[in-house]
Image (cartoon, helix red, strand yellow):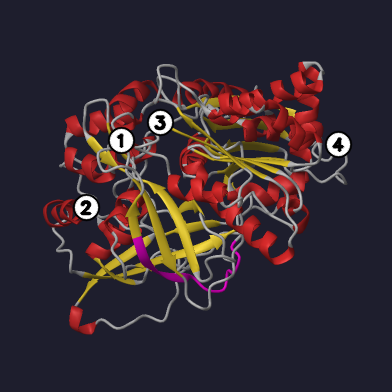
Amino acid sequence: MLYVLYGSATGTGQDVAEQIGRMATARNIPVVVSSMDAFDIQQLPTISHAVFIASSTGDGEAPENMTNTWKFLLRKSLAVDSLHAMHMAVFGLGDSSYAKYNTVARRLHARLLQLGAVDIIDRGLGDDQHELGYHGALNPWLDRLWVALLQLEPFLLPLGFTIDDSPKPTPPKYLVRIVASDGVSQPSRLHSFYDPPKTALDASRLIQATLTKNERLTAADWSQDVRHIELALPASAPVYSAGDIALLYPENVDVATIDRFLNATLQLPPTTWLAIERVDGNALDLPPLVTAGELMRKYLDVFGTPRRTFFERLSLFTQDIDEKEKLLELSAPDGADLLQDYCIRERRTYIEVLQDFSTCHVPLEFLLELIPRLAPRAYSIASSSTLHSGQVHLTVAIVDYLTPYKRSKKGVCSAWLQTLEPGAVVFMWIKTGLFRLSPAIHAQNVLLIGPGTGIAVMRAIVQERHAHRGQTAVGGDTHVYFGCRHETKDFLYGAEWKQLESNRAITSLHVAFSRDQEDKIYVQAKLAQQKAAVFAVLSQGGYCFVAGSAKRMPSDVYSTIRDIVASEGRVSIKEADVFMKSLVRQKRYIVESWS
């Protein structure tokens, strides 16, 4: 038996794992495909052959559906030969433009080796920056994997066996019926679409918040629209802390495109009521009764970008030879360049692909399998519940860009939030984040570094520290570092920060306006200018919190502070690096970043 275990944040890792599962079946290899945390981790030492697919998110964090497995593997009580019977292969999914490229796969692989597992082939690392995306590394890695596996005793092919990787029809997992509107009644069956995250503050009740404010923070003539949003929470909502995260369920706002797709492509009026069941009788991940329009607006990621396997499966639903050939070409390993050009770089959507390949007639029950669910989006909370009881504040950058062929694209969640008016209902959870304040931290000096929308969580922390100082008369210094392009265009909460500094709610404010002078200035330069103060905070038991884009900023800030430690502490770079790593281990240097 071959076990294919994945940790996936956005679905790409799961897609790769399921592809490996299908390829294993085509090679007469019995296979189990599962997320790591859905698998009985206690069985891991008994497995003889396993493939691990691991995605890296944000600042090198493990996806939520592998966190329990990772904790299990890190147990000090595990013997060094715990996995001596395992032959394994690891493939990582990441983006080399980020500081902690493929960190999860690298650490997972190293830990498996520490516990006695043996490589089937060398670790593979997929890179979104490759000209073929992650397929550039995955395709040759899979070729090597099958060559190696098929030489092992359990997986030797029978004489005369022919490998066939062409897509195969499968029975539907869903049953969809059109029901008359006059016969519709509220179903009693529950569904898992709104299931809480593992780290929800209160997993017993989905929060139904009400939007009370939606204001633009950036100048009206500035290219980037950043919003300050305020949500009123119900009395039953949990009390959150600074550093916690709001998980919002968005809706697709391009209703005109959805209606055209339903009417023209599916011949299904948006008001049509649908009854949905699982063929196997298991719990649904969708409402059992919903209109076609609501299904597309609230539950299916119809404006997401399809992955390779979508084209492979789509080829089963056309009789047109040319379109079938094109779909198989897009889904083939040697068609990765075509897939990148047509779909990935252009952010082609599921609706657009189905319209482009108009001879594909996909029954709705299969579309429910082929199109993933609309996932909730995470935003750092920008307020303190101590200061703003019963409210959640968010700082949201509206995602709006042009593709290489100048096609306009918008982020699903930010485009939805942009349209909301006071009184709108927002379904959400609140979960714990990486920053956890305590009385001990409040008593210490802190550096808060949050360029761009990274300032959101720093606003919450400042509010909570200020409130704590007012209640206890105890509190350390708070030094805030922010970066944007222009003081008059995108200085987020600029007047508020100046007032906080004037009122001594923060000790110092250092802002890098990168385009307000000839030479670009970033937060790293502001840190270097304050090197004595920065070193004093960290050498005397203080904390450093960093938030923002996961690309260059986290590594640049880390390097700058390491260099400050070396120069001000009069130690070598190597010794400074040891000091920085000790701060990370002690959770005195914490980074929260996102793609």
Which residue is identified by label 3?
485
**Residue 91 located within the stretch drawn in magenta:** no
Of the residues under marks 3 and 1, which one precedes in the sequence?
Answer: 1
Q: Closest to the observer: 97 or 217?
A: 217
Judge whether 98 appears above or below 215 on screen: above
At label 1, the amino acid type is Arg
Residue 347 horizontal side relative to residue 231, left or right: left
The answer to whether one can see residue 486 in this image is yes
Which span of residues is magenta-colored? 200-213
Report helix, strand or loop for mark 3. loop
Does residue 316 lie above or below 121 as drawn?
below
User: What's under tag 3, amino acid-wise?
Assistant: Arg
Q: Is residue 208 magenta?
A: yes
Q: Which residue is mark 4?
A: 81
Which residue is at 69% across, 52% downward? Answer: 68
Q: Amino acid at mark 2?
A: Asp
Badge 2: few (under 14), some or many (20 or more) residues near its Cα, within 10 Å? Answer: few
Q: Which of the two marks, 2 or 4, is nearer to us in this view? A: 2
Disc nearest the viewer among 3 and 1: 3
Q: What residue would you read off at disc 2? A: 254
Point out residue 122 in the picture as x, y percentages from the top left corner: 65, 22
- Residue 166 screen position, x and y as percent: 37, 34
* Residue type, mark 4 in image: Asp
Among numbered discs 2 and 4, the one appearing first in the sequence: 4
Answer above or below: position of 367 versus 447. Answer: below
The percent coordinates of residue 449 (x first, y second) are: 59, 38
For marks 3 and 1, give the CA distance: 27 Å
Is the residue marked by circle 4 packed among few (<14), some (14-19), or many (20+) residues within 10 Å?
Answer: some
Label for residue 347? 1
Identify the residue at horizontal 70%, vertical 46% (top origin).
477
For the point 65% across and 50% down, the residue is 435
